[in-house]
């Protein structure tokens, strides 16, 4: 890749066309003339659509994939360019060092320099930039662009989001009060990234605490990590507890091996309004005989989250693909007074026939609920009947216990509709949509292997697992006391 044009990475052929769209030293009138000449052959074909009001065209093009909008529709004619003008520099994706062909050194640096030069010259364009995503494939390139990136960030006063892949070992980028969302993605090819550096680490160590104390960051998303204590170098002190200003904390596509350092990290924020934990384990690792259990403990997770019970508005816990969890206790969220959106495994709320009814463990102000029914052994007839009974009780007690409940989703994880019907008694669920509708609540079932394919996953913008997730998994030992730890070369994650 390595090419940067506005929101998306484009091909070299597209860059040849889009070079006319770059704002150099020309004014808007000259630019419009260039675009009009480029699209004059197409003008007759699109004449009817160009008669539509600007606002309608803007809403219509907003439904297109952004790559198509930028690389195709903007080149058709002047009016199409005018419609898309506000989007071109809003989201900038930079991909440096990914080889595009033989003989190309440092691919992407040319386009990187041109884009940044353009932005530094034109204040109007800088004011449109809301998000920058930087992916660097080699450490040397990181060193080359770091100074330019710092210089640019000083001038992007409207920047809301910053995404770094991989994150720097230490964060010292300029402070920007408008930049409130920081995304750190640890999915990268270490062999390529550290090529030429003989002493690169066999297992990447993590120093996450520093990112919790960036004054202007309120939303922090961390992807593709393990919470295993042996992989973290941070020292946690009591004086640092409840001092971070992070309000929205998300861990996406992480290892479910252990809760590990997660409780320590959850002690850092003063008060969380949103917490998302999605763990994933490749099927090939989960099915390896003798591998360390790839599970998290519900009670440990609940205890770590409890300090935020009064402020939490959205709580999401999900296990994708081969990830699993221990259910030796249940979570009672009835006292979480501000919680309105909840996605959680069924077993975290109920356990056997002696558990409390659902409506007694759910928060009273809950509006949306997604229950995960994980892949496992087929349910017994009694277990199927118990599940139906709990959902029926929830509908029957909705007005008295969870009067604001608007939507219930049952996620059959790792199953298609036929498997769910056979194993989980899907046929018995057919009466529930009507039952919930009678009390003003929408009910639906979904079928997906990963959280990304569920309604909650889609609304949070969670993407499907990076890479194949089934290749390059190899075992190594961190020490005599740590057998059975697995490393996935494809996702750069430890399991």
Image (cartoon, helix red, strand yellow):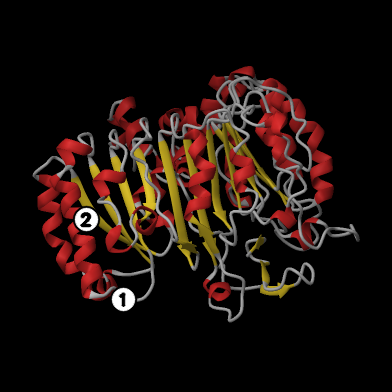
What is the CA distance from the residue labelled 2 to the residue labelled 1? Answer: 18 Å
Mark 2 or mark 1: whose residue is earlier in sequence: 1
Closest to the observer: 251 or 51? 251
Q: Position of residue 168 (x, y in %)?
A: 76, 42
User: Mark 2 and 1 residues: CB-CB less than 8 Å, in contact?
Assistant: no
Residue identified by numbered label 2: 390
Q: Quadrant of residue 243?
A: top right
Residue identified by numbered label 1: 378
Residue 35, relative to residue 187: is it above or below? above
What's the residue at 54%, 73% (across, down)? 286
Closest to the observer: 480 or 430? 480
- The total of numbered circles placed on residues is 2
What's the residue at 63%, 61% (across, down)? 491
What's the residue at 61%, 47% (across, down)? 262
Q: Position of residue 221 (x, y in %)?
A: 57, 41
Let me know if residue 4 appears in the view. Answer: no
Q: Position of residue 230 (x, y in %)?
A: 74, 57
Q: Position of residue 40 (x, y in %)?
A: 45, 37
Residue 390 falls left or right of residue 191? left
Numbered circle sitting on residue 387 = none
């Amino acid at each position: 890749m390595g090419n940067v044009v506005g929101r998306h990475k484009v091909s070299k052929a597209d860059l040849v066309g889009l070079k006319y769209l770059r704002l150099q030293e020309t004014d808007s009138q000259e630019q419009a003339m260039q675009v009009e000449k480029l699209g004059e052959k197409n003008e007759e074909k699109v004449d009817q659509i160009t008669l539509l009001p600007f606002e309608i065209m803007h809403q219509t093009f907003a439904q297109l994939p952004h790559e198509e909008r930028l690389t195709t529709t903007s080149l058709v004619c002047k009016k199409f360019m005018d419609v898309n003008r506000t989007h071109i520099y809003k989201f900038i994706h930079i991909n440096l060092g990914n080889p595009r062909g033989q003989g190309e050194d440092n691919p992407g640096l040319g386009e990187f320099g041109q884009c940044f030069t353009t932005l530094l010259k034109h204040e109007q364009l800088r004011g449109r930039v809301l998000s920058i995503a930087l992916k660097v494939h080699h450490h040397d390139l990181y060193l080359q662009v770091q100074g330019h990136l710092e210089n640019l960030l000083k001038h992007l006063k409207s920047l809301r989001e910053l995404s770094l892949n991989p994150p720097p070992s230490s964060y010292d980028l300029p402070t920007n009060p408008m930049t409130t969302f920081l995304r750190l993605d640890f999915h990268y090819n270490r062999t390529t990234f550290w090529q030429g550096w003989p002493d690169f680490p066999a297992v990447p160590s993590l120093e996450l605490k520093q990112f919790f104390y960036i004054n202007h960051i309120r939303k922090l998303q961390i992807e593709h990590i393990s919470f295993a204590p042996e992989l973290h170098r941070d020292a946690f002190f009591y004086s640092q507890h409840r001092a971070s200003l992070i309000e929205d904390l998300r861990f996406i596509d992480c290892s479910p091996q252990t809760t590990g350092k997660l409780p320590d990290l959850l002690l850092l924020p003063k008060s969380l309004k949103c917490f998302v934990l999605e763990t994933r384990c490749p099927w090939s690792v989960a099915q390896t005989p003798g591998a360390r259990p790839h599970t998290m403990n519900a009670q440990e997770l609940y205890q770590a989250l409890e300090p935020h019970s009064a402020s939490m508005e959205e709580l999401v816990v999900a296990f994708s693909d081969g990830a699993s969890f221990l259910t030796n206790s249940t979570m009672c969220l009835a006292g979480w007074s501000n919680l309105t959106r909840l996605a959680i495994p069924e077993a975290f709320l109920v356990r056997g026939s002696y558990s409390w009814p659902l409506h007694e463990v759910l928060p009273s102000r809950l509006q949306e609920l997604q229950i995960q029914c994980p892949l496992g052994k087929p349910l017994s007839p009694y277990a199927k009947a118990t599940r139906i009974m709990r959902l029926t009780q929830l509908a029957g007690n909705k007005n008295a216990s969870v009067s604001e409940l608007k939507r219930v989703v049952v996620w059959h994880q790792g199953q298609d509709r036929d498997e769910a019907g056979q194993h989980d008694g899907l046929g018995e669920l057919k009466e529930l949509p009507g039952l919930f509708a009678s009390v003003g609540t929408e009910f639906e079932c979904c079928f997906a292997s990963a959280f990304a394919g569920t309604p909650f996953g889609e609304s949070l913008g969670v993407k499907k697992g990076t890479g194949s997730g089934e290749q390059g998994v190899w075992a190594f030992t961190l020490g005599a006391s740590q057998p059975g730890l697995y490393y996935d070369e494809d996702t750069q994650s430890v399991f």
